[in-house]
Image: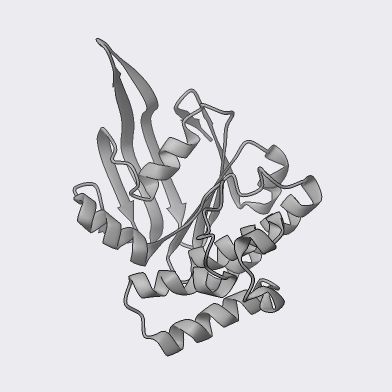
Amino acid sequence: MTALVLDGVRKVYPSGDDEIVAVHTADLAVGDDEILALVGPSGSGKTTLLSIAGGLLAPTAGAVRVGSTDISGFNQKQLTGFRASSVGFVFQAVNLVPFLTARENLLVVAEMTGQPKGPARRRADQLLDELGLTHRTKNLPAQLSGGERQRVAIGRALMNEPGLVLFDEPTSALDTSLGEQVMGLIRDEVKGRGTAAVIVTHDTRMTEFADRTVSIIDGYLAA
């Protein structure tokens, strides 16, 4: 099974009497255990495409299938539930809840989907241990380094065991050494679970951690 299929996806924004095409007709398939790097400069449409893939944005035209679910016709309530249970996100700005500890930032995901507290706590502790954060479980985001915050965000994205994880510039705020460490961690965690991932980046040095690279320029996909 493919983890993600975009079929003829197009995104257009109105601009007065004209329109801005953020993504031209895009076709893309990602295998259920594949790591895909989506590479392009700022303004190329890569984040827009990632947002459509995860149900954060609705396409103007085309179909989006995640796993066996076609989300193209979902309303906002359906999309919210779908994202919570089936897709993991790691955003460029990390977006951790500032008043929650590292452990609590993972547990809040489980609470949103009604997971039993005992198993959720054990899963959170397991993920934090795998990510080398056992000694940081009670720390707030402000008490963590940039790399540690990114690792908490990865753990949060994996908390509900999604079939697809989407990363938006996960290394943009990190130096090369730390960026490579985080990318290696992403690869190990994703591959270890047989999960699919799409990683948006403008840094071609990070593509060596992916199984396949696709470029996007001015809204056009090019393998």
Residue located at (58% from left, 76% from top): 127
Q: Position of residue 214 (x, y in %)?
A: 55, 39
- Residue extending farthest top: 17
Does residue 100 appear to the left or right of 9 in the view shown?
A: right
- Residue extending farthest front: 99
Res 117 → quadrant? bottom left
Residue located at (40% from left, 57% from top): 2
Near-viewer residue (65 or 165): 165
Does residue 113 appear to the left or right of 97 in the view shown?
A: left
Res 58 → quadrant? top left
Q: Position of residue 187 (x, y in %)?
A: 63, 61
**Is 143 located above or below residue 61 in the figure?**
below
Residue located at (58% from left, 47% from top): 212
Near-viewer residue (86 or 94): 94
Q: Position of residue 167 (x, y in %)?
A: 53, 51
Near-viewer residue (68 or 175): 175
Q: Can residue 70 be seen in this view?
A: no
Q: Position of residue 166 (x, y in %)?
A: 49, 53
Q: How is the image coloured?
A: one colour
**Is 31 located above or below residue 111 in the figure?**
above
Label total for image? 0
Does residue 215 appear to the left or right of 87 in the view shown?
A: right
Residue located at (54% from left, 60% from top): 98
- Residue extending farthest bottom: 118
**Is 122 located above or below residue 90 in the figure?**
below
Quadrant containing the N terminus in the rendered view: bottom left
Does residue 176 appear to the left or right of 187 in the view shown?
A: right
